[in-house]
Image (cartoon, helix red, strand yellow):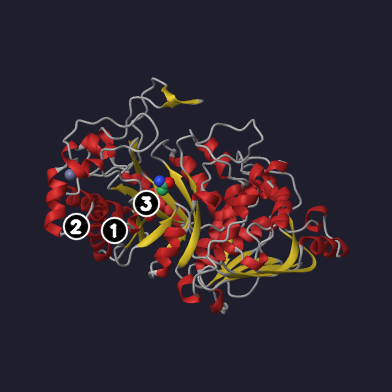
Amino acid sequence: MSVRNWVAAAVLLGGSAWAAEAPAIVPMPVQMTAGEGVFKLTAATPVAYAGKDAKAVAAYLSAVLAPATGFALNALPGAAAPANGILLTTVGADASLGAEGYELTVTPKGVVVKAPAAAGLFYGCQTLRQLLPPAVLAGTKQDAVWEMPCVTIKDKPRYSWRGLMMDSGRHFMPVPFVKKFIDLMALHKMNTMHWHLTEDQGWRIEIKKYPKLTQLGSIRAESPVRGNRNQGDGKPYGPFFYTQAEIRDVVAYAAARSVTIVPEIEMPGHALCALVAYPELSCTGGPFKARTKWGVEADVYCAGNDKVVQFNKDVLTEVMGLFPSKFIHIGGDECPKDRWKKCTKCQARMKSKGLKNTEELQSWFIQQIDQFIASKGRRLIGWDEILEGGLAPGAAVMSWRGTGGGIKAASEGHDVVMSPTSHCYLDYGQSNAGGEPETIGGCLTLAKVYSYEPTPANLSPEKKKHIIGVQGNLWSEYLWDGNDVEYNGFPRGCAIAEIGWTPADKKDFSSFWNRMDTHGKRLDALKVNWRRLTPDQK
Ligand code: ACM
Ligand code: ZN
């Protein structure tokens, strides 16, 4: 049903002012049918749960409804829908909905969320939150009539990887903001936060075996000033990093919101801050200082030094201990080969392994790491440069330099996450109309992002299955803090969420644009510094 028909139906059927509006769900569900009347949530509404893992989701629902409504809804076990209440259940769910799908039925007499697994129940609850007035998302008590329109929804995601990337390397993002970001992802039914943790400009994750990584590598002497990327601000930046205890806390917080955190540890390039701490891992021996300008550093790990391979295995061992994610991102992008061409160790490695060029040396290095990650039951993912010189078997590719890398990888049978600069680089500007804050460059309007179709038409149906998802990237050279991440991330991140969730034939930019009227009120209630819509976004 179109939004316009919905409004007409809901108005005809009566209901409160809010409930008469279209249920502007973002991302748009697969199937949604209007019912008659409204369900009213009160302080006395019973909440029941049944089946596997439903208890935790019920507790989550009560907790998120509490601040704005002031209701302390007590969730209790119970297989049947309580009268005038809410039931969350995995019992008797339609298995074809998969682990993340759900059914949601709202009638004047009650609400039932039914899903095969906890993630689906959780997403049913996100839809439920969006059916209530936007003020329900506020962190403090609000005056509102807590009604939702009656509706029947059957819903499941299009892709299994619905991601956003946070770059804590260029600018450190404090833990409370990381949690807010995870909450925002969950609201949009996004399930993968790619966390960029190491860079030429800062190493941000505590590694117990190599304490100097954060003692020395999490500090830079200065940064480019806002407004002039060629001038330093003279202000030391750091030490800024996440302790392992903080990471465990964030990972658990994300898991409770159906978000998997995929950590990224960059190698063999973008690794200057590791070399600051351990210069013996470089080709030249250093010494080094953390980069104070943006851009790519020429000094990289020495691929001819066995200690480098062992060091990265040790780091990844601790990383895999912290992050249960199946995928481990090892970067692999933008590794200048200048040092390798002149380094006797790198040249000796090429000779002994019969490698024809430095691309093959990079490939050899990535394969060592791939074998190690695979031996631990995990899967390597890297930027599309890891295709050069031969891709490690089992590795997955994140296609960023356009979609060619993704198409090639999928054709060869590798899984692919599409994240091309052309549509998914949310660090680009959002408008050419002037008055925008400084960005890395480019112009990527909301409409352009929304228009993206991740699965290339020219792949065979068999190869299309290897396109596992889509991701928006929030590189932070020009995002100084969470406020900037929110401005660049929303509403373009809402568009990425809809690309990842909603079937292609249901995508409709004008519907999305109209839904942003209501959805913007949600972002306001959550105190998100989202970029307001202007005509140049279309
Ligand atoms: C990248 O943007 N260098 C992956
Ligand atoms: Zn070397």
Q: Which residue is mark 3?
A: 263
Observer-nearest residue: 237 or 249?
Answer: 237
**Residue 59, quarter of picture:** bottom right
Q: Amino acid at mark 1?
A: Gly
Left or right: residue 219 compared with residue 163: left
Q: Label 3 is placed on what type of residue?
A: Pro
Cα distance in 3D space between marks 2 and 3: 30 Å
First in sequence: mark 3 vs mark 1: 3
Q: Dot 3, crowdedness within 10 Å: few (<14), some or many (≥20)?
A: many
Whether residue 96 is situated above or below residue 105 in the rendered picture: below
Q: Which mark is residue 355?
A: 2
**Is disc 2 in contact with disc 1, using a CB cutoff of under 8 Å?**
yes
Which numbered marker is on residue 389?
Answer: 1
Dot 1: element: loop
| Image x and y of residue 432, in percent | 63, 37
Q: Residue at x 83, y 60 (%)?
A: 15
535 relative to 288, above or below = below
